[in-house]
Image: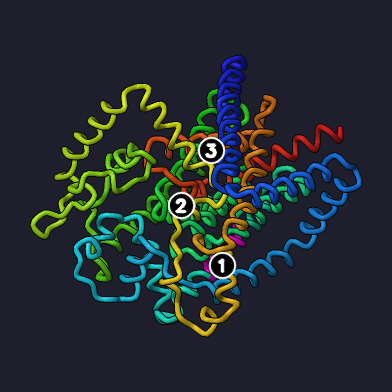
Amino acid sequence: MKHVDNALRKTLFILLGLISLFWLFWTFKYLFTDNLRSTRYIFLFVTILLVLLIFFLNKKFKDLLFKTFKFIYGHKYWFIGILFILQVVISLFAQALAQGDSAVLYTVGTNIPDTKQTILKYFSIYPNNFFILIIIKIINSIVTPKYLILSFSILNALLIDSGIILLTSIGKYLKGEKLAQIVFIESFFLIGLQPQFLYFYTDPITFFFTSLLCFLVVKYTYKKYLIWWFVIGLIFSIAYKIRVPVVIYLIALIIVVIYQLVFSPEKIKKRKLVNKTVVLFSGILITIIGINYYAHHQKITEYDTKYSRNFMYFIDLGLTDTGANHSQLPTEILIPEKNGKIQTRTQLESKLNKDIKNRIKNYGILGLIKHQNTKFKYFVQDGTLGWTTEAVLVESNVVKTKFTESTIGHKIRDIIYVHRPYYPKYAIYMQISWIFVVLGLVLYFKKYKKVTYTELVFQLVLLGGILFLSLFEAGRSRYLIQFLPAIILLSSIGYFKMNSSKSS
């Protein structure tokens, strides 16, 4: 059994190692083909690269770099406080209603009358966005529509910053202060300094909930407090209702528990495992049943899941050229309105199946392989985590206030709005931060070594996330935000292992 155990772990390790190398290749390629298209940006990058090389090759500069990181970590709560203040300031000067789903959420959340079938039935078609609507409704009732976008942005910032602290705590719990320091630096500079908090959508909320789930599972796996497993079930259900792919975290945990039962049964106390499982799934079922009951009986908006997009819709969307090109779907599928009525998913099923078969036939085997490579490239390459591709904030949608209309407001938006003059330089910074994180993954999978079951869960989350996005809709790196806890933790452990091996 030990040989089988070792073979399975090694196979997963090698597979993820190859994927991480491929991932790193696309991040560098994106840097040079998209971020560094002009000569001046190439010069800027080369200058930064030379400075970094000096830091890493010269012991004095290297020690200074590590002392700087240690100082930042040693004053992490001060830095998180400064970050939050910065996010609030940016929110004041750069607030705007994002395009797409955000506009629908704002329309319904603030009770703006609309007669379009696609808006009236939006939460029936996309029921996963219903829970975020409730959050928006609550905030709107407190602050009024005038301050809704600003308040939601500040809430997002608070959730991102809390997620960073939670991930740092996981690092400390797993391997002590050194790992916690790396986790904090990675998460602070990657997601903390991203403009994602301005987005009137679910990404920051999902990042917080998945970070919280990881924190609670790591902390209470070997403790006897059953009530926390009910809380974990409750939090998982909420996160799942916001983003379906969150189920991958639960699947990864279940697989590892079964794996332990098969290969290390002596380490499992079966009675405790049964109790935890019962309590966990009680929390999940009670919460999901409660949310579904409320959704079907509330009067806020229409909620009828017979109109919802099923998995086949997202597979069909995933088969478009980028993996997320809605315009390539047939009109009767993309806008399923016939004689003034929206068609149900049952009525669309045959059309979806037919379109999927046609796409697969047209691709062929080699075409599908190339297509998967293209999808992978699109959802891993961009260090802005999809911000460049989404381009959801535009000057025409800015909320008009004395702050946004000021010179400072225009200067801030010149940096963080995609089509503004200084955004390319900001995108280079974010790309370098992303490359640093992905390089950590490569270092983690550099040399096989049997790891803890906790790390095995994170490995399966990473693999599950990649497989999910490869099969369904992908197309931009924003979809990786929900898997950032696993990505950042594994990457940080990669740097931790490198540093530990050099110290020993």
Q: Are marks 2 and 3 in contact (CB under 8 Å)?
A: no
Residue that mark 3 sits on: 462
Q: Residue drawn 61% across and 14% down?
A: 3
Question: In the rendered image, is residue 486 in sight?
Answer: yes
Name the kind of residue labelled 2 in the image.
Thr
Alpha carbon separation for disc pair 1 and 2? 17 Å
Up-down: is 87 above or below 73? below
State the residue in front, 322 or 231: 322
Q: Earlier in the sequence, mark 1 or mark 3?
A: 1
Name the kind of residue labelled 3 in the image.
Leu
Rendered image: mark on residue 389: 2
User: Callout 2: helix, strand or loop?
Assistant: helix
State the residue in front, 20 or 397: 397
Residue that mark 1 sits on: 414
Q: Position of residue 468 (x, y in %)?
A: 42, 38
Up-down: is 301 above or below 429? below
Alpha carbon separation for disc pair 2 and 3? 23 Å
Question: Which quadrant is the C terminus positioned in?
Answer: top right
Is 122 inside the magenta-drawn segment? no
Q: Position of residue 185 (x, y in %)?
A: 71, 52
Residue 75 in the figure: left or right of residue 200 = right
Q: Main secondary structure of the magenta part?
A: helix
Q: Residue drawn 90% across and 42% down?
A: 59
Q: Nearer the viewer, mark 1 or mark 3?
A: 1
Residue 271 in the figure: left or right of residue 64 = left
Q: Which residues are magenta?
A: 154-163
Q: Nearer the viewer, mark 2 or mark 3?
A: 2
Q: Earlier in the sequence, mark 2 or mark 3?
A: 2
User: Callout 1: helix, strand or loop?
Assistant: helix
Q: Residue drawn 62% across and 30% down?
A: 267
Residue 92 in the figure: left or right of residue 396 = right
